[in-house]
Amino acid sequence: MSKKIAVHEYPGVSENDCPRKFDLDGQTIEVEEAIENWWEREGSRNQRHYFKVKGDDEQIYTLFYDTNRKDWYCS
């Protein structure tokens, strides 16, 4: 199940850039490494941009931006 997250900063002006910092379960996590990213289409109009990242807590996270909802999630 995906959980909505708050992304504090990403380097560009669009969802195409990997986040640098995000909130999850009351904790702010800084991205130490972007491992990979990819796009997936859901239906005819909705796309998701996924980022697999390593946080400063040494955990691996899969984040995505939902272009239809215009929100960030952690899956």
Image (tube, rainbow, N blue to C red):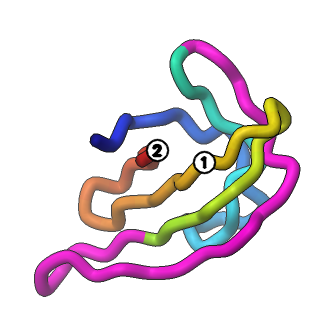
- Taking the spot 71% from the left edge, 39% from the top edge, the residue there is 59
Q: Is residue 47 magenta?
A: yes
For badge 1, the amino acid type reads Tyr
* Residue 70 percent location from the top left of the image: 36, 55
- Residue 60, compared with residue 41, is above or below; it is above
Query: Which residue bears the numbered disc 2?
Result: 74
Helix, strand or loop under label 2: strand
As helix, strand or loop, the secondary structure at mark 1 comes to strand
Q: Residue at x 84, y 58 (%)?
A: 33
Label 2, residues with CA under 10 Å away: few <14, some 14-19, many ≥20: many
Discs 2/1, front: 1
Q: Which residue is the site of mark 1?
A: 61
Q: Position of residue 73 (x, y in %)?
A: 42, 46
Question: Looking at the image, is mark 2 or mark 1 earlier in the sequence?
Answer: 1
Q: Position of residue 11 (x, y in %)?
A: 78, 60
Q: How many marks?
A: 2
Q: Are marks 2 and 1 in contact (CB under 8 Å)?
A: yes
**Is 20 situated left or right of 32 in this image?**
left
Q: Which residues are magenta?
A: 26-48
In the visual, does 12 lie left or right of 41? right
